[in-house]
Image (cartoon, grey):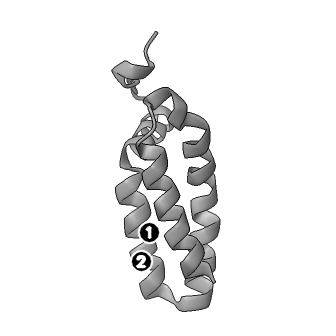
Amino acid sequence: MPLILGCLWVLASAIVAMLPMRQQMVPGVALLIAAPVLLVWIGWVHGWVWLAVGLFAFLSMFRNPLRYFLRRALGLPAPLPKELEK
């Protein structure tokens, strides 16, 4: 079951990525929050190999938001994409 939900998570992420930048925020944050729970569940049920596969996919798909949040957490400048600037 968790692998099926993981596949649905990947499809949902791909659909959200096709939305205009301003409409990606709410569903993107929801997917970002759901990912660790889903990854732990996948690792618990199917083992560390599938956890590693899921973690690689997650980091690949969310590399820019994660980079933004990491820079903010470290107190470094974190510019927003041009599409989100006012």
Q: Amino acid at mark 1?
A: Leu
Foreground pick, 73 / 25 = 25
Give coordinates of residue 31: x percent, y percent.
58, 53
Check disc 1 and report its element: helix, strand or loop: helix
In the displayed structure, 33 sits above or below 69; it is below
Dot label at residue 52: 2
Q: Is residue 75 visible?
A: no
Foreground pick, 83 / 15 = 15
Mark 2 and mark 1 in contact? Answer it, CB < 8 Å.
yes
Give coordinates of residue 44: x percent, y percent.
62, 85
Query: Which quadrant, please, contains the N terminus?
Result: bottom right
Check disc 2 and report its element: helix, strand or loop: helix
In the displayed structure, 51 sits above or below 26; it is below
Q: Residue at x 44, y 30 (%)?
A: 21
Does residue 44 appear to the left or right of 72 in the view shown? right
**The quadrant where residue 55 appears:** bottom left
In the displayed structure, 83 sits above or below 44; it is above
Give coordinates of residue 56: x percent, y percent.
37, 68
Residue lying at the far bottom in this picture: please name it. Answer: 46
Q: CA distance from mark 2 to mark 1?
A: 5 Å
Residue tagged by mark 1?
Answer: 55
Q: Residue at x 61, y 79 (%)?
A: 2
